[in-house]
Amino acid sequence: MRRMQDDTIFALASGSVRAAIAVMRISGPAAATALATLCRNMPPARRASLRRLRADDGTVLDQALVLWLPGPDTYTGEDSAELHLHGGRAVIDGVAAALVAAGLRPAEAGEFTRRAFLNGRMDLVEAEAVHDLIAAETEAQRRQAMRQMEGALGALYDGWATQIREVLAHQEALIDFPDEDLPADVEARMLSRISAVQAEIAAHLDDGRRGEKLREGLFFAISGAPNVGKSTLINALAEREVAIVSAMPGTTRDVLETRVVLGGVPVTLVDTAGLRETDDPIEAEGVRRARARAEEADLVLRLVQAGATPPTADVQGLLVATKADLGALGPAGALRISAVTGEGMDMLRARLAEAARAMTETAGPPPLTHARHRAALREASAHLSMAETADLPELRGEDLRLAMRAIGRITGHVGVEDLLDTVFSAFCIGK
């Protein structure tokens, strides 16, 4: 991404889907000039005003609702404006051409939020939460993203960085003034605080990846022998035709996936090839992929036909006895269902929803939500461990500095320039 903070940028913030209203967002030092050029007179600040928008030659481009938002109290911290246009492509293209003629340029992906970060309107954790909120599919994901965007996660990390900074200040005092009459227990108190922060970070890391799983979604694999009813079940759970259903064994030879919501959590259901020994190289590859997918899954639905003996499981999971409509009983401990008649399906959905919630719900402090946070905290934890056992005060001080920097990279307070392109490139244009 180009570092052109002095440019004034614009983008369609409402997306490219055709709609009645399209919102064009403008931000930068020339926002006021561009708006005055389009409207021929400046609308009042922070009040919605109806204006005719004109090109340089006076051609009326649209009659739009206009908002003038002077900085720094704006999303980006810069002078900004919004044009609520009619959603026709000709209108949007005409206004965009007029803005380019006025010296503005189209925004790059994530550039508005990047500017908000650079101008101190939010930290990097909150900026990532903006993207998560836009991508949220479920209520649970929305709540998690909102909690992060409101600063709960950033405050937790800043608190740890502050504690390490305070310990480092005492450590520097011991290094710089070894002959001063400092309290005898200064070093003991430092080690105690290092240990306390280390324990808090360790507890935060030991969360079963709940926050990341909620943000990314879970994977539930449907596994079992050929013709046990895997494809019928995935169609029933998805409430649409995802997989081909046939009485012929081995119909499903590849991994089929579909996205559903269970317990407020996005879950990808995976229909796999029937598990059996076969000489068919294509089917054998499907069986290999099925076993690999089951090993990676957050939960495996182990299907066995009612009345049959379940095979020895390669992985643990939820045992489900299918085809209950044929009258046979399932093995002990199995949930008995019929995807054809619906028998037991409500119970199965409830069990799956309960499992999804159990894998993602958290209590207490906000959970980890991104892999880069986890990597930085592991690095910080390693340096704190070395600081606890350092033989020399100078080495302890260096490890404390490195731990503080690792945590600071999460929120963007130190050493973040190389992270910005990675973080903001995932954003949509106009955000």
Image (tube, rainbow, N blue to C red):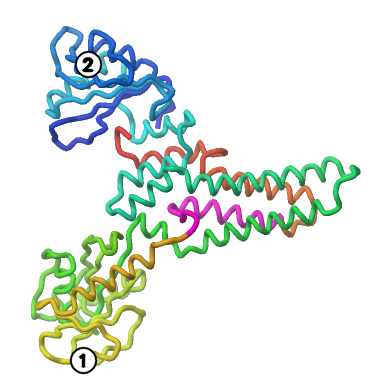
As shown in the figure, which amino acid type bears the numbered disc 2? Answer: Ala
Residue 161: x and y in percent read 61, 46
What label does residue 98 carry, if any?
2
Query: Magenta part of the protein: which range?
Result: 364-387
- Residue 188 vertical position relative to residue 333 in the rendered view, above or below: above
| Residue 372 is one of the magenta-drawn residues | yes
Mark 1 neighbour class, 10 Å CA radius: few under 14, some 14 to 19, many 20 or more: few
Question: Local crowd at mark 2 within 10 Å, few (<14), some, or many (≥20)?
Answer: many
Question: In the structure shown, which secondary structural element does the residue marked by tag 1 occupy?
Answer: loop
Residue furthest to the front in view is 47
Three-letter code, disc 1? Ala
What residue sits right under mark 1 in the picture?
Answer: 308
- Residue 227: give x, y in percent of width and height: 15, 81
Specify the quadrant that holds the N terminus.
top left
Q: Residue at x 36, y 35 (%)?
A: 110
Snapshot quadrant of residue 212: bottom left
Side (left or right) of 429 relative to 73: left
Q: Residue at x 21, y 84 (%)?
A: 336
